[in-house]
Image: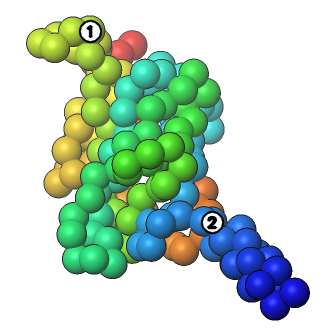
Amino acid sequence: MLRFRIVALSVCICILTGCGRDGFAPVHGQLLYPDGSPAKDLEGFNIVFEGTAADGRGYSSLGIIDAEGKFTVFTNKPGDGAPVGLCRVLIEPKMIDSEREFAYPIDSEYRSFETSGLTFEVQNGKNTVQFTVEPSKKNP
């Protein structure tokens, strides 16, 4: 009976904390334009979170943006999330092949951690974030 209680308590803790591996937490989000519409033209692009985990190592976590501008971030396997703490964020272009990329429909500043201006504080447990991105000034 004691073993059952310990297992039940462990399952409850896992559910309440998001059940990620130590130092990582699930992150789901959406990219929007300033008018509030989903960034649908970013479908197939990657969003990358970069942060330092509890083990002191730097990690890059990736999410593939869907047709509604939504994404789920993972580091090593689906659902494991991003490192807990402050993460810098960028949006990688969608590639046609290994050398050519699709047109980048948002300002080019989002290509780099240094210029994107996007950050997110990942907390223990489940995380949801919305980023507002500016369309490229080259697009009509």
| Observer able to see residue 136 | no
Give the vertical position of 2 relative to 127 (above or below). below
Front in this rendered view, residue 6 or 63: 6
Quadrant for the C terminus, please: top left
Q: Which mark is residue 18?
A: 2
Q: Secondary structure at mark 2?
A: loop
Q: CA distance from mark 2 to mark 1?
A: 35 Å
Judged by depth in the image, the label closer to the viewer, 2 or 1, is 2
Q: Is residue 40 above or below residue 16?
A: above
The part of the image, by quadrant, that contains residue 135 is: top left
Residue drawn at point x = 42 percent, y = 58 percent: 82
Residue extending furthest bottom? 2
Q: In the rendered view, does 80 fall on the left or right side of 126?
A: left
Which amino acid type corresponds to the residue marked 2 in the rendered image?
Gly
N-term mark: 2 or 1: 2
> Which residue is at the far left?
99
- Amino acid carrying label 1: it is Ile
Crowd around label 1: few <14 · some 14–19 · many ≥20 (10 Å): few
| Residue 67 rendering spot, x and y as whole percentages | 57, 22
- Taking the image as shown, residue 13 lies to the left or right of residue 116, namely right
Is there a contact, CB below 8 Å, between mark 2 and mark 1? no
The numbered mark at residue 96 is 1
